[in-house]
Image (spheres, coloured by chain):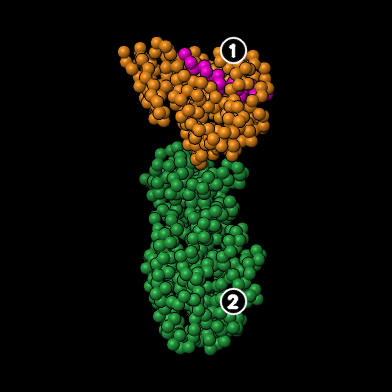
Amino acid sequence: MEIKPELLGKKTRDKVIKYIAASDEQPPYLLMDGDVIRDKVAQIGKNIRNARVFYAVKANPDIEVCRFIAGLGIGFEIASEGELRILAQIGVAADRIITSNPMKTFRFLEEAVEYGVNYFSYDSKTEVDKMARCAPGSNVYVRLTVPNEGSEWPLSKKYGVEIEEASTLLIYARDKGLNPVGITFHVGSQCNNPYNWQSAVDKACELWETVEAAGIKLRMLDIGGGYPIRYTKKVVEIETIENKIDKALRQSFADDVEIFIEPGRAVVGDAGVFVGSVIGKAVRGDENWLYIDIGVFNGLMESIGGIKYNYIVGSRGEKKPWTVAGPSCDSLDVIDKKVEILEPEVGNRILIPSAGAYTISYASEFNGFSIPKTILI
Amino acid sequence: MIKLFEKDPYAPIQYVYEVENILYRGKSDFQEIMVVENRHFGRMLILDGVVQLTERDEFFYHEMLVHILLHAHPNPKKVIVIGGGDGGVVREVLKHDSIEKVYFIEIDKEVIEVSKKYFPGVACGVDDRRVEIKCMDGAEFVKGRDGDIDAVFVDSTDIIGFAKSLFTVEFFKSVKDCLTDEGMFVTLSESLHFHKEMVIEVQEAMKLIFPKVDLYTASLATYAGNWWTFSAASKKHDLRTMRREYAIDTKYYSDEIHAQAFMPPKMYEKLMNKELRW
């Protein structure tokens, strides 16, 4: 079977096939194509004026992946001491690190301050109090709620405040000896609706002007992440989204405002290809079940949240609809239903493209199944 | 006079044969099988409209698929033949006294039966006690075997018709794993006239997996493109060198042919660099 280019870029396909051919590594493992990461990094932020890009480490915290990204010169967005330690190990300077976690643990905050990290987001008074104590004088930015329609992974309910409260919090932070520098928002992960950024930018502008009137001059707007990648559906191009954002920014903000972008999925998602194997087949009722060695608990957690993956098998069998399930004995471990796949043999390899983001970072060893190794190619 | 228009979907040329008699026509689970008679070529086996062999010239192909490897190998005992339900490859393999076991893997049992009936001179070896016939997918058979096989012969264009794909790589890998440290592998890989790109792809895929890969050719009158290639791979030994004496009865293959069948080194380099401008 030829692998269609829309499922896997030709260059990545060749690298993956080459790796599989030459290596004795046993599946499952995750291959990360550095060239794809490099291309994505070159693309993100390109069309937004005065932009700085910070890779959201949670998408894929593999140390070699982070080292590679560090080499590309962009910054990092982290949320925990664990992520900070990875960056510390590869020697990323503190001025390249920000944290947009509005509710930080004490330990993280202490370690971040000690390391020299100086950008912290927040959305509550308790966090201001915490930061005033552990990180006095730090640059802080407030998290605003924005519409999350059209994103596959809405986030705004958990974090963020409305304009009035955000304004109060910026003033409160100043009064507590912190340095309020900006605003952040997140339109939701895998957001396929460019208008979300536009309305978010408008909302941020309103807040910006409100606090300016109160004597606080902000200088930074963090537009979060959320750029979508192609799984099984076509998505809006990054360039289109950025052009829209840039237009909105130019209308509402001065030229010297710094724009921070925190992409995770968009940087590493398309670079990753899971290489697994078919461990069993069964017919249950009128459903064909396909069991593979990568499941919901050891890599494909996002399938539960609705992400649909593609599957490539090296098979000459017939195309059939399959219910694809992972290896664990938990009934939740069903990855997808009614997926058209050529019937493979047990033992065949199965490739899952677009698996670079939020896969291994979610994986556990539940039921004794190991977490697939990440290999940068 | 009935005329047979060959239906090879991949060839930019079409051959037409005069048919004296249709001796057999049937449909198996896998393909349409036909045996016809032609004044010049004798009996011809046709699968899904494509000529597989003719009595007159089948030995060119069968000898060349088999004897290069079996002379480059120092002491071949156990081999696998994938495809080639007509039995021609098995017949050639059995000419070597060192052979103790032939696993003959043909997915379509009916091709074997039809050949035994209509091509006794080709299928003559399939009932030999050293031959074990298995009607299954060859790619499945080689999977997960111990490394006890000395040579694998693929007499099927179908099995490598997926160059550069995951299938090819998985197949080549399992072939390598089923071979001994001195093991060798050969497969037909299309014509240099018509399908140069595919030849390159097969060679490239083989090189990903085997330390030694080479290419030899033979001229086959009834296969479209005529100048056909055989892609061969080896885990240890160079294939151009004969390690056994030529002491079998053949019509085309000989020690002389062994020495000249391989593509000249500079030309091979050009082929792989895509510098052959045709």
| Chain letter behind tag 1 | B
Name the residue nearer the viewer: B28 or A257.
Answer: A257
Residue at the (64%, 36%) spot, across then down: B211
Q: Which mark is residue B249?
A: 1
Chain B in the picture: what colour?
orange
Secondary structure of residue under mark 1: loop
Q: Chain of mark 2?
A: A
In the depicted structure, whether residue A22 falls above or below residue A122: above
Real-space Cα separation, disc 1 to disc 2, in angstroms: 84 Å
Report the mark closest to the observer, 1 or 2: 2
Report the front residue among B210 and B174. B210
* A271 with respect to A149 (left or right): right
Res B109 visible = no
Instruction: Count every numbered label the image shows and give the total.
Output: 2
Residue A243 — which label? Answer: none
Residue B60 visible from this viewpoint: yes
- Name the residue: 67% across, 29% down: B237
The x, y position of residue B89, in whole percent, is 53, 21
Q: Which residue is mark 2?
A: A118
| Residue A148 appears left or right of A65 | left
Q: Amino acid at mark 1?
A: Asp
Image: magenta residue range: B56-79
Q: Residues within 10 Å of mark 1 (few under 14, many from 20)?
A: few
Quadrant where the image shows the N terminus of chain B: top left
Q: What is chain A's hue in the picture?
A: green
Residue closer to the observer: A59 or A157? A59
Q: Is residue B65 magenta?
A: yes
